[in-house]
Image (cartoon, rainbow, N blue to C red):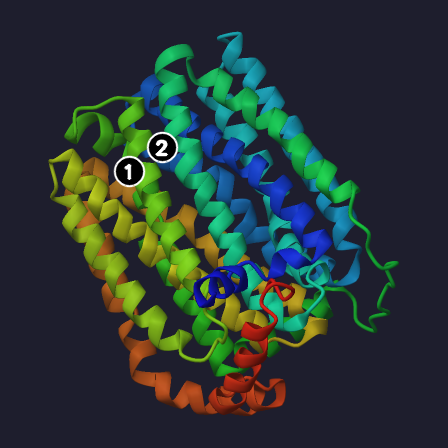
Amino acid sequence: MATAAKLSGMFRALSSRNYRLFFVGQGISLIGTWMQQIALSWLVYRLTDSVFLLGAVTFSSQIPSFILGPFAGVLADKFNRHKVLLVTQTLSMVQASTLAALVLTQTIEIWHILALSAFLGIINGFDISSRQSFVVEMVERREDLGNAIALNSSLFNMARLVGPTIAGLLIAAVGEGMCILINAVSYIAVLASLLLMRLKPFERVQHEHKVWKSLQEGFRYAFGFAPIRSLIIVVALLSLFGMPFTVLLPVFARDILHGGANTLGYLMGASGLGALCGALFLAQRKSVVGLGKVLLGTMTIFGVALILFSFSKMLLLSLALMLFTGFGMIVTMASCNTLLQTLVDDDKRGRVMSFYSTAFMGMAPIGSMLASSVAEQIGVGYTLAGCGFLCVLSIIPFAIYRPKLRRMVQPIYQRLGILPEIATGLQTATDLTAAQEKR
């Protein structure tokens, strides 16, 4: 009974109908997204044999998020997030359909990929902030928010486990185009889930300030409070130094491990499995208390795993190390996300989450371009080892200041009723009604 209640508690957020619809539709779409990402990476490296161009494609797809993210956050606080998501998901389907047509007709060129990747990056700049902020509208119980975020991570990484594995096999059998076409079709699922939701009528909040003033207000709020500022910086550093490993994986798969597209799929799948384990680890937690200490450990695990992976020439060892990179990366990112969502005021949520998205999606292209440029000169092995070492170093300041940051957030935790002694009572009540309270 206790085990069943605990498992039930891990999926509490699914008791909310709107979130349940989103969970299913997004899950299908994300499998397609990962299939396209693997197919595109393999296609670029097959066509160009260039590590630099691998980084350039990632740069073009993610740099718009760095530029547009903060402004998109202001819009997420001003406009109906549900309608914004309908528009962005439709445009994403158009992008994938165009890319699939070019690949299947064998007319694709590298400039097509760069241009369409930039277009998708612009779409994502608006989509991510709205989607992050929309979670709180889909979840009926505020205390289920942390679990919903963890389940989002679980969903993302379940797709990351399944999508690349399927993509690797499909690429070997029929080529990259079919993977991209499947992604285009998969958007139907998430669009259907959004259309089937029953939401409260949208009430536009009247803001006194213009967009630029709202952006300045959000910036002062986020970066003027040390705990929020520190979490955003951790995400930015992990994205800058750590995320480039995904750009370099095609080179490891083909040139170091002497495999094909299926090997790339297995590596990404192993990382996805580790990340899924990490997300489920977070999902079973019933309080944000202690997450700061958790992310210290997982950031270190991630960096050390990257260093060891960079010197591995054995597939089985590489797969095992990918498990640890996936676990460390997602627990660190999701812990920062959960802590931010807990600390931030509702009227500034969109703007703060846009800074999170900017740090996550915006710093990665800069890191990818730097890593791919360095890899051209010194090789992918030493480059990735350096990335891992910088990840470990970057968490040291957070470790030093964590006691001070913890004291600063205690009044917020007390107001929300999630200090350890209060959380104990809440967790007991949650366990007793776990079947109904699916966070």
Where residue 337 appears, as percent x and y from the top left, is: 51, 65
Helix, strand or loop at label 2? It is helix
Residue 54: give its label.
2
* Distance from the alpha carbon under mark 1 to that under mark 2: 8 Å
Earlier sequence position, callout 1 versus callout 2: 2
In the rendered view, would you say 143 is above or below 111? Answer: below
Where residue 100 appears, as percent x and y from the top left, is: 55, 18
Q: Nearer the viewer, residue 280 or 116?
A: 280
Residue at point 36%, 59% (across, down): 238
Q: Kindly tell me whether residue 378 is visible in this rendering.
A: no
Left or right position of 284 against 262: right
Q: Kindly tell me whether residue 395 is visible in this rendering.
A: yes
Q: Amino acid at mark 1?
A: Leu
Question: How many marks do you count on the picture?
Answer: 2
Residue at point 30%, 64% (across, down): 299
Left or right position of 250 against 31: left
Q: Which residue is mark 1?
A: 248
Where residue 23 appears, as percent x and y from the top left, is: 61, 47
Q: Nearer the viewer, residue 174 or 280?
A: 280
User: Around disc 2, counting alpha carbons within 10 Å, would you say few (fewer than 14), some (14 to 19), or many (20 or more)?
Assistant: many
| Residue 133, image quadrant | bottom right
User: Around disc 1, counting alpha carbons within 10 Å, would you say few (fewer than 14), some (14 to 19), or many (20 or more)?
Assistant: many
Helix, strand or loop at label 1? It is helix
